[in-house]
Image (cartoon, rainbow, N blue to C red):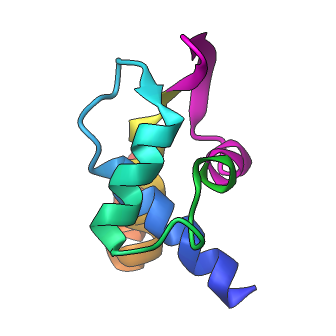
Amino acid sequence: QDREESWEVKVYEFASQYDKEKEWVIVSEFAKEFRENYELGEEDMNATRLGKILNRLKLVMDRKKIGKKRGVKLDIEKAKKQILMWKEPDIFTEQLKEVL
């Protein structure tokens, strides 16, 4: 369970720093960049597994086939909010108080 949570935090963190918010992202390319960023092997994180995590975290706003590959639009703002909640709970609480 802890290992899966750490994957979720890493996905939130990587997606929050991704600069292609309005563009279609090829899941296999996103997975490759993710692996390179965290120095992982294909067996640690492949496109299928990463796609399932993105779906579970509800970071996929839209999806379509691009050629023979899967393309998605990522909810970067949600990823930024979630990573703030995970990494900086005090800052998140302060921002929440300001909203309320």
Q: Residue 58 at what x, y percent from top left?
A: 66, 41
Q: Work out whether residue 97 can be spotted.
A: no
72 horizontally vs 87: left or right: right
Relative to 45, say whether 61 is above or below. above
Q: Does residue 100 appear left or right of residue 5 in this picture? A: left
In terms of depth relative to the viewer, which is nearer, 82 or 73? 73
State which region is magenta.
Answer: 51-72
Visible residue check, residue 80: yes
Q: Residue at x 69, y 42 (%)?
A: 55
In the rendered view of the protein, which quadrant contains the N terminus?
bottom right
Does residue 43 belong to the magenta stretch?
Answer: no
- In the foreground, 89 or 78: 78
> Which residue occupies 63% across, 77% down?
5
Above-or-below relation of 91 to 52: below
**In the picture shown, does residue 64 fall above or below 83?**
above
Residue reaching furthest to the bottom:
2
Image coordinates of residue 82 in percent, x first then y, are: 48, 58
Q: Does 93 sit left or right of 21 as displayed?
A: right
User: In the rendered view, would you say 24 is above or below 57?
Assistant: above
Of residue 4 and residue 80, the one placed in the foreground of this image is 4
Could you tell me which residue is drawn at 50 percent across and 70 percent down? 9
Measuring from the top left, give residue 66's x and y in whole percent: 53, 12
Q: Residue 43, how many percent across, how many down?
A: 60, 71
Q: Nearer the viewer, residue 33 or 12?
A: 33
Q: Residue at x 38, y 76 (%)?
A: 87
